[in-house]
Image: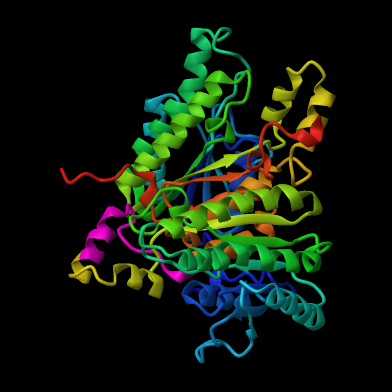
Amino acid sequence: MRLAYKVALVTGGRQGIGRAIAERFMAEGAQVIVCGRGVRPSDLPTQMIWQQVDVADAKQVAGLFAFIQAECGKLHVLVNNAGVQIEKTIAETNDDDWQLLMGVNARGVFNCIRAALPVMATGASIVNIGSISGTTADPGLALYNASKAFVHGLTRSVAVDHGPHIRCNAICPGWIMTGMADSAFAVAKHPDAAKADALARHVAGRFGEPEDIANMALWLASDESSFATGQLFTVDGGLTAASPLNPNLF
Amino acid sequence: MSNSRITGHLEGRVAIITGGCGGIGQAICERFLAEGAQVVAADLAPKPETMAADIAYFQHDVTSEGSAIALAEFAQQQFGKVHVLVNAAGIEIEKTIEETSLDEWNKIFAINVTGTFLTSKHLLPLMRDTQVASIINFGSYDGFIADPGLAAYCATKGAVHALTKAMACDYGPEGIRVNAICPGYVDTPMLQSFFGDSGDIESLKQEVRNVHPMRRYGTPSDMANLVNWLAGDEARYATGQLWVLDGGLSAQVQQMRL
């Protein structure tokens, strides 16, 4: 039980990566609080606490942390997982897109960390979900790419400003099989061919699963990683280790 | 190390650690043993008396191809296969390039780079078909940014980083993962030597500590914690990456004394 007696908050935990992290943390003994914009998912394990919160809204986030302080005292692990993706270039992006995407991916992470700091125990760990797209651009995902670069930058700042009491790292997932990946393939001319091509570019021979990211999140949440801070840890099946120009695929 | 950290996830695995008798190498050997692996410390230096009897020892010169072949034959006979290889053997030379002789340059490349190449090359056939193979190389945060007076060392670590990605790219399709860990300042004899002739060592060490967001040096067990994660199945989607573990040192711009 690597997270026994720890209290962990996972934002955007309804499905996908966030849900896998929440379940992994629970299995390792943590008291897990999960939040999302909607009502409690019917299949959420009963031991998990659900809070209906839009992380883009600072007032709602303040309420969330007041609740955590009242119910649990200190918070040991914060996972900023909530994120949205919009498949558009800058030319196609309208102001509402900006409000939605930057509200969740950038302001949401800021809101949660700012509100969490006074509630976090000494030795606490913040795990942000960045992306390989925050370091190298995915075509047609302009604001998403930029928002993840924001997350990477904020990760370093939080580590530098709030160490040694609090650690802060980001995980940069590659292509993880979630609804978000499906919607990225859906905009391709030939979604099945796009998927096969993407697969051939992964030296691991498969796409990632939410559990792959949950494994990394668990390590970063636990005391095993007590010297790790301010870093971006990529888990992408080797995708970004190889050149984007892959001569084997010509 | 509290027992709750030990999960036995390397039960039945064979692990070989070059430089296994050094500061960080020993911590890795002991962690792997605690996790249930059969462990071989492969090192030119003799096995320390303090090291657990259950850790096998093979005298290995990483710069010698004959030694790499002999290590592979030993592993083949003893275990039949190898699941985890940690290329931790390495040296540091504290010199600028003008001060570095060609012999010194060749020596550090032979140990840090050629050693990683040769041991990996000859153990790969024993790792193939295990489905769970993991190679962990030792890079350094010095492979990204320079410390003064460590020119050849920085260059060898940059080479290990590139080699790591190339190996991951070539062997990933066979299910062999390759990653590098990139330590920052770790409290080992190598660090003591780096501080060697710097005058008031204690106040210098404190100053260095204060530049770290974590306000401390890394320990060999910090490094072993990450190597342990990368060695096992929890990291099964992690390959081709350089894992910086430096207490946040390289997350910041060089600190001005304001």
Q: Is residue B212 magenta?
A: yes
Name the spot of residue B172 as percent of width and height, x first.
Answer: 75, 50
In the image, is residue A224 above or below residue A107?
Answer: below
Question: How many marks can you see?
Answer: 0
- Return the residue nearer the eye: A55 or B214: B214
Residue pictured at 55% horizontal, 19% vertical: A142
Horizontally, residue B86 falls left or right of residue A163, namely right
At a point 52% along the width and 65% down the height, the residue shown is: B106
Front residue of A129/B74: it is B74
Residue B137, image quadrant: bottom right
Name which quarter of the figure residue A240 lies in: top right
Give the magenta range: B204-222
Viewer-closest of A47 and B187: B187
Against A143, is B72 above or below?
below
Q: Residue at x 28, y 60 (%)?
A: B209
Tell me where residue A249 appears, x and y as whole percent: 80, 32
**Quadrant placement of the C terminus of chain B:** top left
Residue B23 visible in the picture: yes
Comparing A173 with A95, the one in front is A173
Q: Residue furthest left?
A: B258
Q: Position of residue A45 (x, y in %)?
A: 64, 46
In reply to whether residue B20 is colored magenta, the answer given is no
Up the image or down, A166 lies above or below B137; here it is above
Pinpoint residue B13: horizontal percent, then vertical percent: 73, 72
Q: Determine if residue A218 is in view.
A: no
**Model colouring:** rainbow
